[in-house]
């Protein structure tokens, strides 16, 4: 099968007057040739052709008028237009280009010259259509990426609200001490975390933790810390305040028991504060791959 058999060439001309010659050359080369009379009604779908040839040798003004209408009808659709002219003057040749033709061919011409022009513009049409298809594909991918980014952004916003809900909404105060916090993560969510809480009428506990990394994985570790810190043990009507070292040891052991594949790492300091001003702090690095 030749290339010409898959291409549709539309010939616009008066009956006879060289049109039969052009049609025969194209048909012999294997092209599918459609015909439209210059003085006929407007074409229903000029964009379906791969190439349009305007035979204007006998009626140049009429051919140029048809060329202008075709170019307007085609709009953004690229279909090359080849104008065949019998006029040899430079003004006439220029007029064939100004009316919307992409090139012109002067009579008399050899059949090989016509076919060379046709093949050149069909190659150009193929390249244009290929690039247009690739551009459309890129645009489709871009739209899908934008939708994915929007979903990710929405999910991050939800993660931010969840993480903020785990932060203390108010800070307990004692006459001897005041707490103030400015929390500013580098992104929507982060690995920095803190809490301040009353343990009994004489004690406060507070900690500051920094989970390795940033983003959603780090924020998930902060939730683990929030749920994993056990600072008080209750036995019926009695209770025991867990020493900071023991709190961190238990938390570290819990991380090890999770057997997480990403080997998370958290740096944390936990302080037990007595109302008389006594501090009992312990800092540690908590890892899922070795015990404290």
Image (spheres, grey):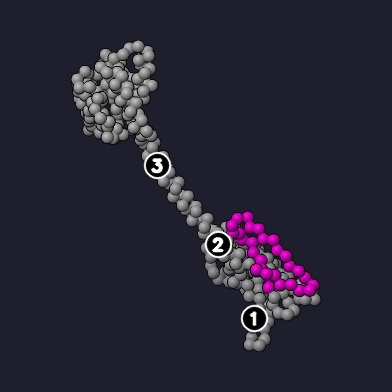
For residue 233, which numbered disc appears in the image?
A: 1
Q: CA distance from mark 1 to mark 3?
A: 64 Å
Q: CA distance from mark 2 to mark 3?
A: 34 Å
In the rendered image, residue 109, in percent from the top left (x then y), is placed at 27, 15
* Image quarter hosting the C terminus: bottom right
Residue 182 located within the stretch drawn in magenta: yes
Specify few, some or many for label 1: CA neighbours under 10 Å numbering under 14, 14-19, or 20 or more.
few
In the picture, measured across the screen, residue 226 lies left or right of residue 121, that is right
Specify few, some or many for label 3: CA neighbours under 10 Å numbering under 14, 14-19, or 20 or more.
few
Residue 267 located within the stretch drawn in magenta: no
Q: CA distance from mark 1 to mark 2?
A: 31 Å
User: Which range is magenta?
Assistant: 168-197
Q: Say whether disc 2 or disc 3 marks the residue closer to the N-terminus.
A: 3
Of residues 95 and 289, the one nearer the viewer is 95
Q: In the image, which is nearer the foreground, mark 1 or mark 3? A: 3
For residue 159, which numbered disc appears in the image?
A: 2
Identify the main secondary structure in magenta. Answer: loop
- Is label 2 in a helix, a strand or a loop? helix
In the rendered image, residue 149, in percent from the top left (x then y), is placed at 50, 52
Q: Residue at x 59, y 71 (%)?
A: 227
- Is label 3 in a helix, a strand or a loop? helix
């Amino acid at each position: 099968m030749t290339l010409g058999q898959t291409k549709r060439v539309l010939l616009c001309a008066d009956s006879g007057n060289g049109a039969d010659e052009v049609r025969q050359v194209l048909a012999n080369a294997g092209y599918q040739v459609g015909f439209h009379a210059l003085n006929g009604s407007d074409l229903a779908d000029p964009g379906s052709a791969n190439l349009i040839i305007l035979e204007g040798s006998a009626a140049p003004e009429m051919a140029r008028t048809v060329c202008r209408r075709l170019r307007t009808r085609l709009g953004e659709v690229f279909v090359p237009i080849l104008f065949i002219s019998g006029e040899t003057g430079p003004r006439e040749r220029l007029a064939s280009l100004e009316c919307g033709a992409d090139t012109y061919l002067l009579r008399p011409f050899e059949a090989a010259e016509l076919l060379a022009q046709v093949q050149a513009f069909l190659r150009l049409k193929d390249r244009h259509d290929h690039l247009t298809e690739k551009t459309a594909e890129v645009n489709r991918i871009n739209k899908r990426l934008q939708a994915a980014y929007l979903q990710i952004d929405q999910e991050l916003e939800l993660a931010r609200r969840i993480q903020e809900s785990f932060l203390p909404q108010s800070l307990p105060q004692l006459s001897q001490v005041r707490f103030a916090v400015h929390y500013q993560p580098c992104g929507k969510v982060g690995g920095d975390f803190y809490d301040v809480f009353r343990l009994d009428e004489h004690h406060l506990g507070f900690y500051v933790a920094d989970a390795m990394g940033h983003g959603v994985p780090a924020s998930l570790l902060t939730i683990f810390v929030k749920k994993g810190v056990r600072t008080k043990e209750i036995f019926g009507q009695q209770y025991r305040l867990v020493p900071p070292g023991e709190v961190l040891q238990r938390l570290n052991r819990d991380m090890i028991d999770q057997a997480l594949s990403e080997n998370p790492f958290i740096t944390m300091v936990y302080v037990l504060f007595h109302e008389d001003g006594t501090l009992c702090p312990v800092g540690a690095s908590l890892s899922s791959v070795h015990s404290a």
